[in-house]
Image: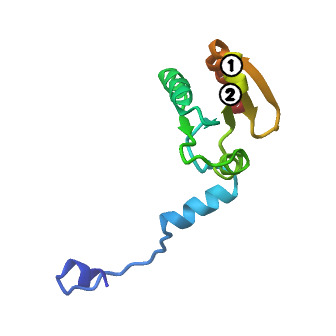
Amino acid sequence: MIGDFIGDGKKYPAVGISFGLDVIFDILKEKGNIKNTNTDVYIIPMENNIQAMKIAQDLRNQNINVGIEMNNKKLKKALDYANIESIPFVIITGDDELKENKVIIKNMKTGLQIKVGMEEIVEKLKQDIVSILI
């Protein structure tokens, strides 16, 4: 078979086995050694996309991987997506919170959520992301 690929007609003795990368990826994912995504934070804007994009840019400037829900999914569907993709944190930018100059940060693993001021978002997330890695 190797000779056929090379095109020289010779026979090459060989023994071996190969797995496709998709099989290896599925096994690693099943064992929990791999995340579905590199996203650390998923922002769910409640009809305030401009503010969400500003927050995302601030987080990206601090080397935090951010995704934004831009398909106008309902909150439950967006949270389900974050769970499926194993995204550890969600930021919810509701109108009431933004009036207070705050957002909700939800830890998707524990289910705990807190309301923090805009100036505290980066610091709080960096602390929480580090605590997950330890």
Whether residue 10 is visible, yes or no, is: yes
Residue situated in front as seen by the camera: 25 or 60: 60
The answer to whether 32 is drawn above or below residue 40 in the figure is below
Residue situated in front as seen by the camera: 114 or 46: 46
Q: How many marks?
A: 2
Whether residue 103 is visible, yes or no, is: no
The circle on residue 74 is: none
Q: Give the secondary structure at mark 1.
A: helix
Which residue is at 31% across, 85% downward? 1
Which residue is at 67% across, 16% downward? 101
Callout 1: few (<14), some (14-19), or many (20+) C-alpha neighbours within 10 Å?
few
Residues at marks 1 and 2 touching, judged by CB atoms closer than 8 Å:
yes
Residue 31 x, y percent position in the rendering: 70, 56
Residue highlighted by disc 2: 95
Residue type marked 1: Lys
Residue type marked 2: Asp
Which image quadrant is residue 11 in? bottom left
Is 107 situated left or right of 2 in this image? Answer: right
Callout 2: few (<14), some (14-19), or many (20+) C-alpha neighbours within 10 Å?
some
Which residue is at 68% across, 48% downward? 74
Q: CA distance from mark 1 to mark 2?
A: 6 Å
Which residue is at 53% across, 28% downward? 56
Which image quadrant is residue 106 in? top right
Residue 75 x, y percent position in the rendering: 70, 44
Is 77 situated left or right of 36 in this image? Answer: right
Residue highlighted by disc 1: 99
Q: Residue at the far left: name it.
A: 8
Residue 40 x, y percent position in the rendering: 61, 35
Is 24 situated left or right of 128 in this image? Answer: left
Residue situated in front as seen by the camera: 90 or 87: 90
Q: Give the secondary structure at mark 2.
A: helix
Quarter holding the C terminus is top right
